[in-house]
Amino acid sequence: MNSSMTRRNFLGSMTAAAAAGLAAPGLAMAAKAPEKWDKTVDFLIVGTGFAGLAAAIQGHEDGIKNILVIDKMPTAGGNSIINGGAVAAAGTDMQKAAGIKDNPDLLYADILKAGGGLAHPELARHIADSSVENYHWLKKQGVKFKAVTFHGGHSVPRSHAVMENSGAGFIRPMLAKCKEYGIPVQLRTILDEIVVDDKGAVLGIKARQNYRFGRDNSGKTVYIRALKGVLLAAGGFSRNVPMRMEHDPRLNEKFGSTNHPGATGEVLQAAQMIGANTVQMDWIQLGPWTSPDEEGFGLAPLFVEPAVGYGLMVDPATGKRFIQETGNRKVRADAIVAIEHPTIIYISEKNAMNKIYGKNMTPELFNRAVENGVVRKFENLKALADYYKIDYKTLKETNDKFDGYIKAQKDPEFNCMMFKDAVPNGDGPFYACRLWPRVHHTMGGLSITDKAQVKDAHLKVIPGLYAAGEITGGVHGMVRLGTVAVADCIIFGRTAAHTAAGKTSKL
Amino acid sequence: MNSSMTRRNFLGSMTAAAAAGLAAPGLAMAAKAPEKWDKTVDFLIVGTGFAGLAAAIQGHEDGIKNILVIDKMPTAGGNSIINGGAVAAAGTDMQKAAGIKDNPDLLYADILKAGGGLAHPELARHIADSSVENYHWLKKQGVKFKAVTFHGGHSVPRSHAVMENSGAGFIRPMLAKCKEYGIPVQLRTILDEIVVDDKGAVLGIKARQNYRFGRDNSGKTVYIRALKGVLLAAGGFSRNVPMRMEHDPRLNEKFGSTNHPGATGEVLQAAQMIGANTVQMDWIQLGPWTSPDEEGFGLAPLFVEPAVGYGLMVDPATGKRFIQETGNRKVRADAIVAIEHPTIIYISEKNAMNKIYGKNMTPELFNRAVENGVVRKFENLKALADYYKIDYKTLKETNDKFDGYIKAQKDPEFNCMMFKDAVPNGDGPFYACRLWPRVHHTMGGLSITDKAQVKDAHLKVIPGLYAAGEITGGVHGMVRLGTVAVADCIIFGRTAAHTAAGKTSKL
């Protein structure tokens, strides 16, 4: 392929072609460079989630002067701000204090294992190796951690939860830091097209200011030049039904999503229009811990994740367990989809008080979940069985068996991980929750190097184009482990800024 | 997104921009239109495999005058010519004569089931509904069918094998028909870039003539205008190691491929460079029936496919069966990869003579396989066990059990389909073969409509661009059933020509 030769001669031959009245050099969908740029910055960041804000701060700290962050939504934080609020790190002081032995190799192995062979090893390695440094960097930005929690699929507890119990615990201090550094965050500005030069290098973007989300043609077109490059940190496409059905036709409009309404993927599509490569777009993760009794992400995940390994998940139609409760997200979601109706997870009050409080769930949030009917309290197993129309006798057998596994610290049926501080659930009182999966994360996306540079279809780096976070693919492979995406976003956002600043070192 | 407005105003503003000496409208990688086209045709077809040749003939029959077929290789036929030589069709006269009950709905259901929910229903439907008409169309082109055979994953035998036992049985008559119709087939001509107009519609291609495969910069550049469109029928990317590792990092250079050397994917990449969307690129099929004792596709598949359901597949390390022999390709390949060494499949001479001859395997080919050591003959089970270092006692138990399943017409262990005419394998004599998977088919590729039009990243049709065959994705989903791809290629090749000719009807 010698397309670069063509592009090199592009401008010269262009004038002649135009003069001859021939068809213009057809170029699919990238915008033309304007006669005058409306604005020129050094580094343009598209998206105000974890990746975008981390890149802005890192870029500033690496000496990039004129940084601009844009977002199409009327508020900052993207989908990140409604995240569960914990970041994976392997080998921190908090883990040591809790007696948890962990290291980057173990995290790397867990990512690759969950990824089913599809995770790009060099990207997983970068996350694993940077995770502890990243945890300290986040603390430096003012992020306050309160506990180390366990998420399914990890070998050990390594999800570092923030005080706020949500992604806002990362977003707010990072926004404050951007303000302190004088980095403008311009909302209601949507990227329409990426502008490239005659060699295919990115010059800047065509965007619309004063855009109103949901009004397709709103806003005024502006061209923004970005001298040191453009970072695409605009998130995934969980909310774009035709786009997700293109890659997985099952995921029609009947599946809800945990994501914020802006997770619509148009920035990813704009990058494809200039030849950016995509990978693993058909791996779209369903969250197994959402409840049909509330909307969006909701409170159920805060109840479910610390409950696994203590409580039981049963099929109400049979009164029996049907899957390893501590299995990864895909294992659990596929199993629930396969039984074709919501499952029940329940845990005794004793285990709940021990485990659920003090992790991501505060007493206030827990009470709210109970008031909303998302989590229900039952005095004993009979009451629970009656409410969910489960055969009591079978459920009792299931419950007794599981109590035996807790005592034996071993589950020969489904190999559920048994935690040392778990106590038999006995006859309650219990807290229970119904679960039905929602589209949670689009694992696939733009293909990047371990320096966060976007690759084109020929697997060559597109000069001046970076991507980080959910808009990228290949980081997680088939299955993304809980809280690894937060590390992914922040580490690759920072890496993109580092590369754009001309640094060659790792973080 | 209002990129179309931009493109509409492209030519006008272009001259001004060029005059102003600004950066040219950067447009990644699509070639500029030349001042003069070297050649103008009505319909340009890239690739001389099943899809390309079927499109050429159908295009001629639909009244397109000036058709040109190009191929980068020095010989015609692409990967198709070394195909196994059978096409799926559901409900033919040959099936009826053999007492096989089949219909399009059953084929459709089988494709969707194997596709694991990822197959695009409208594409699978088009193949299933057109398969019988397509079988008759092939007979009209001079294709000679000899038998209906069974392939794993299908509900019934429906693979219509040709006399020649290879794809040449389709390719040769189609090439002859092209000659009869006066359609030129120009070899050693490689597509480098796709040329589009200012609205993103395809005008033609930039190519090199007198290209020599393997010499990267060989050949002379020519621009070919295609008035009614360009059909990309250039096959998959099984032989492009970096490209397949981008989508599935496991498939490194240590995995061989059954494909011809030209299966390198650069035409797919060129389409991506003008914004074409790709789907399911990470579903790369391993053939479970290749032998480490020969190269490429080889003769082993001709032995294995008719043997399943009569013979046993055992792990030589344990002497036991480990997978449903009649399971689909992915089920079998994954199981063999999981045991981490080649498996053995064996069948008694009595079953072999009954089943293997007269399907795709002729006595000549069978003898060649035995002479080459790909298939080995053993007088009894002890000799077989000794040769492969399998524990005889365990193997005997496995063999006896399987004979019992044949008699009972039911396999309670692995649910292997038991054929009515199977006889107990007893104590031989036996024929046996070692198996280790190779990269066989890239299921993913360009996203198309059921009229074979290529979609861009915004899921809109790219005017003037068609694709058919292995270069497309979404047809098969996770797993492609044997011989369905041949139907896919020919049906969608014909459909592309039909659409380019302005026909709105189905085939």
Image: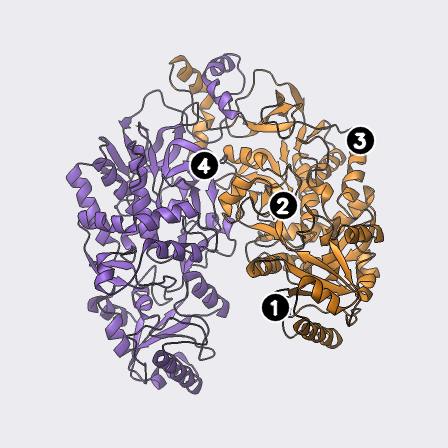
Chain colours: A purple, B orange
Q: Is residue A91 visible?
A: yes
Q: Secondary structure at mark 2?
A: loop
Looking at the image, which is closer to me, A271 or A54? A54
**What amino acid is at disc 1?**
Thr
Residue A202 quadrant: top left
Q: Quote the CA–CA distance across marks 1 and 4.
A: 47 Å
- Nearest to viewer (mark 1 / mark 2): 1
Residue A211 or A384: which is nearer the viewer? Answer: A384
In this view of the protein, which residue sits in the foreground, A49 or B347?
Answer: B347
Compared to A283, does A357 lie above or below? below
Q: Point out which mark residue B318 bears.
A: 1
**Which class describes the residues within 10 Å of circle 2: few (<14), some (14-19), or many (20+)?**
many
Horizontal and vertical percent position of residue A273:
46, 35
Q: CA distance from mark 2 to mark 4?
A: 27 Å
Viewer-side label of 3, 1: 1
Q: Which residue is mark 2?
A: B257
